[in-house]
Image (spheres, grey):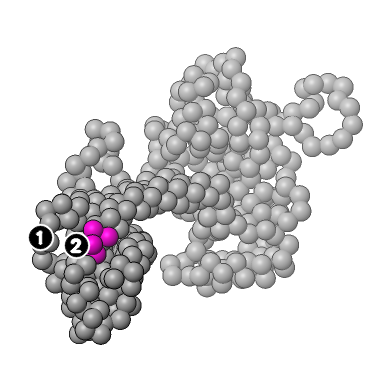
Amino acid sequence: MNFPFHIAKRYTVSFSKSTAINIITGIASLGIIVSAMSLFVVLSVFSGLREFSLSFANDTDPDLKVFGKTGKSVTISPEQEKQLKNSKNIARFSKVVEERVLFYFDGKEQVAYLKGVDSIFKQINPFEKKFYGGQWLTPNTSQVVVGYGIANKLSMGLFDYNNAFEVFVPKPGKGTIDNPNDAFNKAVLVPIGIYAINEELDNKYVFADLGLAQELLQYTPNQVTAIEFQLKPGISENNAISEIETVFKNNVTIKTRAQLNDSLYKMLNTENIAVYLIFTLVIIVALFNLIGALIMMILDKKANLKTLFNLGAEIKHLRSIFLFQGCLITITGGLIGLVLGIIVVILQKQFSLIMVTPSMAYPVVFDVMNIITVLLTIIILGFLASLIASGRVSKKLLQ
């Protein structure tokens, strides 16, 4: 063991003769403990909120979604369907048709998306788990499943046979329209279910049978706006994407779940960075106390340093004493704070100490990456703070 580390360890575990220095060192150590614990708890809470926010997308979005590279629709041939069904990467796929249309009910109008889905859709996106009331639609019927927000705006309930729930879809084509009735394709729908996921989705979709949506949009049976895929467990997205591109001869655009929610991911990543930087600033402020404590310790041990210098110790060795001391204080405080933070997170996960609502605990996630992040932050900033303080040791000081 080299003598600077040995002396630094003795200085760290023993009390100084000066009460003021002991108090300053104690405050610095406490600040490091609290800031490390706070950073870990906040990162764990944010990881929980992130997971909670993304759970809605994970429940409603497919692993991959294919769109036409040009135009609003994509055509899938029987041969392509056969290739996809025999795929080693794809578990199942669903053909969908989406279009922004006008819905009318009992004198009220609402613009939303009509989403036509086939019988495979509910196996990829289990909307039945998010039902507010009713049931999923039956294929090849005019039954629809409506978002809670849309139903609320239209003051619409289920199985209301006194008022017609109508959809109006603009007809494709060019030229002037002589008769307004000829401008839209119209259908009477039967609301059979209401889903409730989140405010955005609840106000966005009305689910209908694929054939009905294709008829309203005047699509052919093999023409859809998108194809949604569920991958087999353990399959790489890149492998599946390469296979799909081969099947469609690179004439489609493929998006992953993250790309479908890129704005949400960007927002969460930005918030995560902002929270990390704010609490890193708290650690930096706490480390100013460490710098002050080390400088006071240098002044207190000035006579001892002179003796070591006269015995042949180099200035760099004397600086190393306080560099090691600062690092020891930082690492010890960081580990204690991290252990306390882990205890808080585990208690919250097990016993739901803090509740958002009477039925929902504040979400937290125990993530090893958060532990690594806190340790690296504490060690790097503690080293820099100790390096600054140990730089006060000089020949001029010892003269």
Across and down, in percent, residue 368 comes to 31, 64
Category of crowding for the residue at label 1, using alpha-carbon neighbours closer than 10 angstroms: few (below 14), some (14–19), many (at least 20): few
Residue drawn at x 71%, y 66% as measured from the top left: 250
Give the side of residue 253 with respect to residue 378, left or right. right
Residue 207 visible, this orientation: yes
Towards the viewer: 341 or 55? 341
Q: Earlier in the sequence, mark 1 or mark 2?
A: 1
Query: Residue at 22% across / 67% down in the picture?
Result: 302
Give the residue drawn at x 18%, y 72%: 304
Say which residue label 1 marks.
17
Residue nearest the viewer, comparing 35 with 91? 35
Write down the region rendered in magenta: 295-299
- Which residue is tagged 2? 300
Q: Is residue 115 above or below residue 146?
A: below
Which of 222/285 is in front? 285
Badge 2 crowding class, 10 Å Cα cut-off, few under 14, some 14 to 19, many 20 or more, is some
Label 1 amino acid? Lys
Q: Residue furthest front?
A: 399
From the viewer's perspective, is residue 113 above or below residue 63? Answer: above
Above or below, 280 relative to 178: below
Horizontal side of residue 216 vs 304, given as left or right = right
The secondary structure type at the circle numbered 2 is helix
In this view of the protein, which residue sits in the foreground, 343 or 232? 343
Under mark 2, the amino acid is Asp
Q: Is 301 positioned to the left or the right of 177 in the image?
A: left
The quarter holding residue 210 reads top right
Relative to 379, residue 359 above or below: above
- Image quadrant containing the N terminus: bottom left
Name the residue rendered at 56%, 69% in the picture. Answer: 238
Q: Main secondary structure of the magenta part?
A: helix
